[in-house]
Amino acid sequence: MTVISLPQEYNEEGLFVDLRSIFGSSLFLKCEGFNFAGSIKLKAAAGMVEAAERDGLLTPWSVIVESSSGNLGVALSMIAASKGYRFICVTDPRCNLATRRLMEALGGEVHTVTEPDAAGGFLGARIDYVRSLCDSDDRYVWLNQYANPNNSAAHYKTTAPEIASAFPHLDVLFVGAGTTGTLMGCARYFRRHHPRVRIVAVDAVGSVTFGAPPARRMIPGLGTSVRPPQLDESYVDEVVYVEEADTVRACHRLARRGFLFGGSTGTVVSGATQWLADRGAQHLTSVAIAPDFGERYLDTVYQSTWIHDLYGEDVLDGIDGGAELPTRSWSA
């Protein structure tokens, strides 16, 4: 029996899904959504808040402020509620409605930036808004997930060792690139402790994180319009780019087998399976990280009108292809 007194004290960290029967590759998916925040962002949120408290940056009258496309905002709303802080999340129109409502249900305040910055992205505009809030009141404390070393440190201490323990003979690790906190924490851990493991970053087409040109991105979670300050590309062996239509297709292939995952997971799985197929490396032992589940994406990634308007009527054609479904035997 597990008994807790704070929601952040519970996080199921040891669950992996074997995707061989779905995609035909030796790919295992680390599920990070089994906690009260519903995503991997609980680790980063807890690490940043605890460090800010130790350093004296957070006091009982502080107001936590953060820019987030959704999941970190939910995690911080939950932690702020449990600790008695006020929390303001600055987001943009791509944030799922369910995610915004969840933050508000937890007591968070959601400020939505509706106009992009001069470069056409929302992240820069969100950060400018956060800075203006902090300049207006010295009670406001910006944790800054994009540059805060405690973001990646949380994954160096937890996520990466969990994977290494479960797969001591791991060949390839696929990690989605958003703020790059998860990516850098895992990459640094494996470079130090298991340098033979290949680190492949998965990014969305249209993201500027690794120097690609900006373009429209509609699915929140992965990709940025401003290069994350904590990114160190020397720890990354390769980068794979995934079109959003392929993200949608991967999500629906998983859902057809009973696994409802979020958009970031669809991106990472699509990138991982394509990387393995291109190299004829389906036999390699590989792990991909699934940041969250799909309930918050029911109005977007899993909503037919939204999908068809953005990616075309035929975007889901052929998603039942790939590895064969298991054979069932029936007896009278």
Image (cartoon, rainbow, N blue to C red):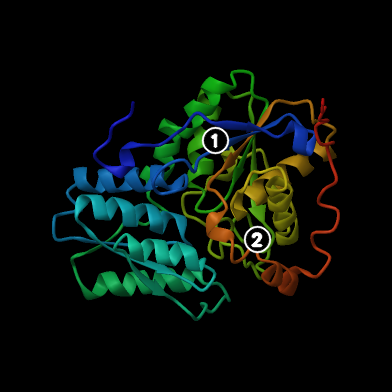
Q: Residue furthest left?
A: 60
Q: Residue furthest front?
A: 332
The quarter in which the C terminus is drawn is: top right
Could you say where residue 242 lies in the image, as x and y percent from the top left? Answer: 72, 54
Residue 302 visible (yes or no): yes
The amino acid beneath tag 2 is Tyr
Q: Earlier in the sequence, mark 2 or mark 1?
A: 1
Q: Is residue 54 left or right of residue 324?
A: left
The amino acid beneath tag 1 is Ala
Residue in the image at 54% along x and 35% along y? 187
- Quarter of the rendering containing residue 21: top right
- Quarter of the rendering containing residue 151: top left
**Mark 2: few/some/many CA within 10 Å (<14, 14-19, 20+):** many
Which mark, residue 187?
1
Q: Secondary structure at mark 2?
A: loop
Residue in the image at 81% along x and 51% along y? 319
Nearer-the-camera pick, 82 or 204:
82
Residue 67 visible (yes or no): no
Residue that badge 2 annotates: 302
